[in-house]
Image (cartoon, rainbow, N blue to C red):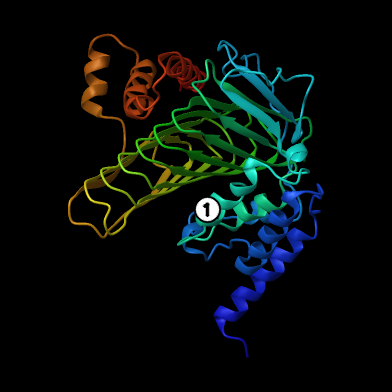
Amino acid sequence: MQSPKVALRARKDEATEARLATLTLPETGGWLDGLRADALSRVRAMALPGPRDEYWKWTRPETLISPEVTPAALFHDDEPPMFDEVDRLKIVFTAGKFDAEASDDFALEGLTIERLAEAGATDLHWARDLYGTLETNGQTPVERPLAALNTAFATDGVLIRVTGKVSKPVSLIYRRESEASEAILHHVVKVEQGGEMTLLENGPAAARFNKVLEVEVADEATFHHVRTQARDHERRAVTHIFARLGRESVFKSFTVTMNGVLTRNDCVIELTGDDAVAHVAGAALGDGDFHHDDTVFVTHDAVNCESRQVFKKVLRNGAVGVFQGKILVKEGAQKTDGYQISQSLLLDDDSQFLAKPELEIYADDVACSHGSTSGAIDETALFYLRSRGVPTDQATNLLTLAFLAEALDEIDSEELSGLILARLEGWLERRRG
């Protein structure tokens, strides 16, 4: 008779093989093929996640790993796509494939951009030492098999090398055309010493979307990332960011999520150079059939580094928010400044916020803190606004935006934060009452 542990592993292996049977390992004929094969071996060794896994106990992974894609209705509205007002270099993916006709010319001073499928067919390439490397490092101590699955089967993506200060943002735009589409994209960004860039992401990529973004930020380099996940009510998505920071480098990532049946955003950051700064933040607004999970792991492995995790979720009509965040301070990482806050605003009694903040510290000269709270609208503040003639719905929206402000403050660009604030206001207005 099998032990429960052996039986559980057998079920996970069966589910893994059923999923793999629906995928074909891409072949490019170059350096990429070996890395894909290695990633496939790692997927089989780990097995795809199950509901009994520690970091999946609050987010059921079945629809993310099933052989069939759960259909998602195409969403249409009159609101223009995000970032249309921004002067940017556009790179468009339609149905999970690079769309040359809709994209801009890749030429921009201070960086080079190449397609993964084309660069992977060469014998030598700078991305050979990065593709899958940060993802592999991020598998310890917590396994992330859906990221390894992506490394193996990603059909497209871009490789971006930044050698100077880029004058305008690079914008990755995702479009979908089918109710049962699936997209697996993998991007690699290398910011060389002294370089600086801003990466934007938006758009509904697929009914089921798996994306990996690997970012290496070299000494004295800066990387800004702003992402919106909206305009698609029924999508299911799992995304991963793996980042490694050098000396005196800066990494800042912000995500706003306003729709989606299931969204899981993983972020794994390693601070390996002294005086590095890493900020990761998010704002989520969910209504009804909405499940949103932010899982973050920040490792301090150098002296005098700073990290911030700031996550705010607004939930109503049975929506569910999850936050799992950890700060690991390794031995010798003295003078670490680590800050983590996760908060939810529950606009009714049916919604739920589940949080697991963690600190693990092996150095004695640090300033680390974490906190997590969940609550309703401040009735005193609401009464004050109503007594000044502000209608209840409008007052609730004002207090909701004030609650989200700390997360929005993590965006350095006033232009980008203003655009996102306007979208948040629009979302709240459409859901009055």
Can you tell which quarter of the image residue 254 is in?
Answer: top left
Can you tell which quarter of the image residue 377 is in?
Answer: top left
Can you tell which quarter of the image residue 251 is in?
Answer: top left
The residue under the point 66% across, 50% down is: 150
Above or below 420: residue 373: below
Q: Quadrant of the N terminus?
A: bottom right
Above or below 410: residue 104: above
Measured from the top left, where is residue 175 in percent x and y? 71, 28
Kindly identify which residue carries mark 1: 59
Instruction: Give left or right: position of 192 versus 159.
Output: left
Q: How many marks?
A: 1
Measured from the top left, where is residue 311 in percent x and y? 38, 37
Q: Quadrant of the C terminus?
A: top left
Nearest the viewer among 254 and 277 is 277
Give, as a three-letter code, the residue at label 1: Thr
Measured from the top left, where is residue 307 in percent x and y? 32, 41
Residue 62 visible, this angle = yes
